[in-house]
Amino acid sequence: MDLKDRNKPSIRQLEYFVTIALSSNFRKAAQILNISQPTLTSQIAVLEDSLQLKLFERSRAGTLLSPAGRELLPLVRQLLEQYQQVMDQADSSHKELSGTFKIGVSPTIGPYLFSKVLIELHRRYPQLKLHVREGVPQELEQGLDRGDYDFILTMLPMHSSENRVRPLFIEPIFLVLSKDHPLAMQDELSGKDLYHQDVLTMDERHHLYRQIATLCERYAAHAQSRFASNSLNTLKQMVIMNMGIAFMPGLYIHARIAEEDQLKVLSLKDEKLNRTHVASWRKNAPSRHLFQKISYDIKTIAMELFDDVLDEVNPEDNPDFK
């Protein structure tokens, strides 16, 4: 019989197959499923006929998976998980977001993104309450694992593989310098212009520090760790005083750097500097379908508000997305 002419297995039959495989006993499986054993036996026979495969072998030790059944089990479990995700997504799409959740954000983006995004989220979902707390990336990840946060907004790379990670957007990073600085005379810079320059940085707990320290090492610039800052505002003031140059994220520049600051913003023509922002939550969180929806809304609102600053992310290009 051709495959297209067979009766296709139902989701319910596949659930029966997995339950028997995990319990190794038709009677126990029937009790778990709350159906009669003859009904279960009949449905498995229909499934085996549809697949033209023998899925189980009965012995004195109990019900064992056949070789074909062992090969199919992980595929069927994956299919059922994906089916449940579809149902969760469909269920959440017609529900208004509501509830109270604890969100962790990085201090290098929270104040410059959430000041506008939260207003729009509240307008869309007045029953949604978000308690926002700032933390550096490593602390955010640890707090998510401990349950201090329900949901975090952070940057790649992430260290834990136990959480769901969803892409939001890419934020460019620019070189900022005083208009009195010698490099400000140029309209275009390249990496070699950083040679022996004093580069002010965030402190080492921030992803931004590691990015810039790597860049300084590449071009023999001097990363001024003794003047490391824990805030972008402080970093900006040091640049205004011409204590060095600094690399700052696009959203901060958009929100906090004005013409009267006497600062110049430039890109390096041979270095594409950016950081990828993501949302993350625990894989088995009860409200995971809501977090999926919240992350989507945060992304779309941010891209609408800051379309001249942010870029789209292609998750297929990055293996960190799960």
Image (cartoon, rainbow, N blue to C red):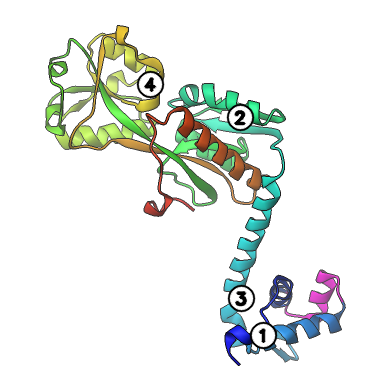
Q: Which residues are magenta?
A: 23-35
Residue 19 image position (x, y, % from top left): 73, 73
Residue 78 image position (x, y, % from top left): 59, 67
Element type at mark 3? helix
For marks 4 and 3, the one nearer the N-term is: 3
Q: Nearer the viewer, residue 98 or 239?
A: 98
Type of amino acid at the residue the image marks with label 3: Leu
Contact? badges 3 and 1 (CB < 8 Å): no
For marks 2 and 4, the one nearer the N-term is: 2
Return the residue at label 2: 121
Type of amino acid at the residue the image marks with label 2: Leu
Mark 3 burial class by Cα count in 10 Å: few <14, some 14-19, many 20+: some
Contact? badges 4 and 3 (CB < 8 Å): no
For marks 4 and 1, the one nearer the N-term is: 1
Residue 286 seen in the current view: no
Type of amino acid at the residue the image marks with label 4: His
Query: In the displayed structure, does residue 183 sit left or right of residue 62?
Result: left
| C-alpha distance separating marks 2 and 3 | 42 Å
Q: Nearer the viewer, residue 191 or 138?
A: 191
Query: In the displayed structure, does residue 109 sit left or right of residue 46?
Result: left
Q: Residue at x 22, y 11 (%)?
A: 242
Mark 4 burial class by Cα count in 10 Å: few <14, some 14-19, many 20+: few
Return the residue at label 4: 254
Return the residue at label 3: 73
